Amino acid sequence: MKAATAMATLIEQHFSADNPLRQVVLVACGGSLVDMYPAHYFLNRESAQLHSYMMTANEFVYAPPKTLGKQTLTIVCSHGGNTPESVAAARLAREHGSVTITLTHNPEAGLLNWSNHNVLYEWGGESQVTNNPMAQILSYCVEAVEQTEGFAGYADFQHGLAQIDGIIARACQQTLPRSADFAARFQHESLFYVLSSGASYGHAYGFAICSLMEMQWLNAASIHSGEFFHGPFEVTDETTPWLVMVNEGQTRPLDERVVAFLQRYAKKIEIIDARELGLQQIAANVVDYFNPVLFYSVMCTYRSALAGIRHHPLETRRYMGKTHY
Amino acid sequence: MKAATAMATLIEQHFSADNPLRQVVLVACGGSLVDMYPAHYFLNRESAQLHSYMMTANEFVYAPPKTLGKQTLTIVCSHGGNTPESVAAARLAREHGSVTITLTHNPEAGLLNWSNHNVLYEWGGESQVTNNPMAQILSYCVEAVEQTEGFAGYADFQHGLAQIDGIIARACQQTLPRSADFAARFQHESLFYVLSSGASYGHAYGFAICSLMEMQWLNAASIHSGEFFHGPFEVTDETTPWLVMVNEGQTRPLDERVVAFLQRYAKKIEIIDARELGLQQIAANVVDYFNPVLFYSVMCTYRSALAGIRHHPLETRRYMGKTHY
């Protein structure tokens, strides 16, 4: 309910009939940008009044949307809170008159200098929605829609937030043996394709660039399930590994079509199915938005298992924090 | 000027003060979706009134935006004109009351059944802007902005359209020896990363999924230059090939930062620089949008050289049109 109160205060203080909230800009880098995709997807699906933009921070700094101004809410997330591009983005937003919500786990973050409202979350505890920036950003955007134009799925969404921690805890238990088996089978691979659709596409991208490329120095690429059949599938053979996150909800047929194809023509496949992991307990009109929240925590068990068997700790870096760039 | 007249007619026939044009939805699959990215980028940068959505066709069919309706212009492109998801998307758009512009090179296309206005282009002649769907979609969106709210760069954009064919012809000559050298050096590689930013990011994605994955059965991934330093760069080593398309315009610093890093830590790099290829002739306030039009034709010389030396013709497929999926 914190998001509800905070959004009500922001709307009351900064927006009015003469200056309505019209745009939401979601800005961050890498893993934090990944955390914004479900909110962007939700706004595009469910809002008639709010125009959503999602941009990597440095592109926003060099080429912001024309609409950036007093009718804009800019949400900026940076785990450490001092990513230079993200701090510059929050600053630029404020200089253009935009209201900003920031998210960080660092109470001393430079980002706080440019924040109208900050969400301080606990790092390491992000399998609970109250500390999960992805779920938090989504909640704030649900509030933005509910409090400006109304959202018919609002009560179901709140109920989903109350259900998801339990679903995730059980799903992670359920996938522990699977992720160990996955790690054993895939430990010597050097390239992975990661597929999903709907609100989860952002997490397919996130698993590729953060969990595999950054944390394991493994080559990886995300592919949208709907795009797979229009180019990418020509690389399918029996030697390349494919991870498919199958959504519960509207875009499930897109993911299922990929799985059916891969089961015919590929050999190295790992399927992570939100329905099988219990997500269908959440109301059908809002379940789409909870898929990536579930996949995030479940896929953490996969990356931990892979890191363990490969003796490559998740926090090992060769460039980030070690060189200037 | 065809786009200007066509858009004026569509606006006069279908939109009014009571029913203004408010949304543009850009829908297609694979290579045709790639062709929509510059228009989506342009609308986000330059329009205060038009909300742009860009979606792969099957996701649009299963999960369309809430706003889809009479205030929406939906643009659907399909080279062959019978891609089932794209035809279904145009049909869904019309059923929701949206006006549709379709683009295809097939005068008998199924897509035409759901079209308010069709752009028939000549396939094989797409290095000229009049036959290039990417440039055409961009032109129609420039007209949509000009004719609804006005676009300060309109005259410069039209001048750019008159300049770009000549710039492209010279740039392709300039890159012929380079692309032959590239093909010789990279012929035995099995994985490529393709980077760019701004309006050209879509073409980085397109070169990865169409030119490399589909047409050469080579592994590939696109990375946004702004995202590179937030995860992906940890895979950088001396063995992996990197292609960087350096834009002329606002986001050039993002691409240059990638090049500077790769020149320190990577060995296999190919840089395609729009400035060096003559794009700075175009007015600075609109040059950003012409980068991907240039890169499309220039990168065709690269993929042809690669196909030649690898004895893998660009049209070879193992699944598309050969199996059911």
Image (cartoon, coloured by chain):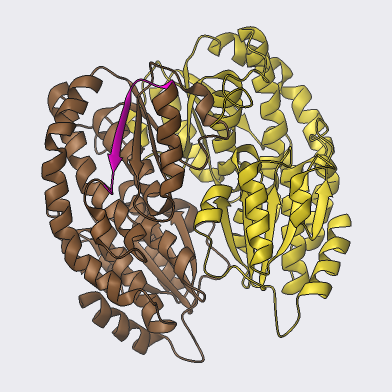
Chain colours: A yellow, B brown
Above or below — where is B200 with respect to A31?
below
Say which of A171 and A92 sits in front: A92
Asked if one can make out residue A45 in the rendered structure from this viewpoint, the answer is yes
At x 35%, y 89%, the residue is: B12
At x 64%, y 43%, the residue is: A84
Q: Identify the image quadrant of residue A324.
A: top right
Where in the figure is residue B97, as x and y percent of width and height?
A: 45, 77
User: Which image quadrant: the N terminus of chain A?
Assistant: bottom right
Where in the figure is residue B106, as x and y percent of width and height?
A: 17, 59
Say which of B185 and A296 sits in front: B185
Above or below — where is A233 with respect to A73?
above
Q: Of all residues shown, which one is farthest toward the front? A: A324
At x 42%, y 54%, the residue is: B57
Above or below — where is B30 with respect to B180?
below
At x 20%, y 47%, the residue is: B297
Say which of B162 and A276 sits in front: B162
The answer to whether A38 appears left or right of B181 in the picture is right
Asked if one can make out residue B106 in the rendered structure from this viewpoint, the answer is no
Q: Of all residues shown, which one is farthest toward the bottom? A: B17
The answer to whether B235 appears left or right of A112 in the picture is left
Where in the figure is residue A110, as x and y percent of width and height?
A: 75, 46
The answer to whether A244 appears left or right of A114 in the picture is left
The answer to whether B260 appears left or right of A32 in the picture is left
Where in the figure is residue B245, as x and y percent of width and height?
A: 33, 41
Q: Which residues make up the magenta segment?
A: B265-275
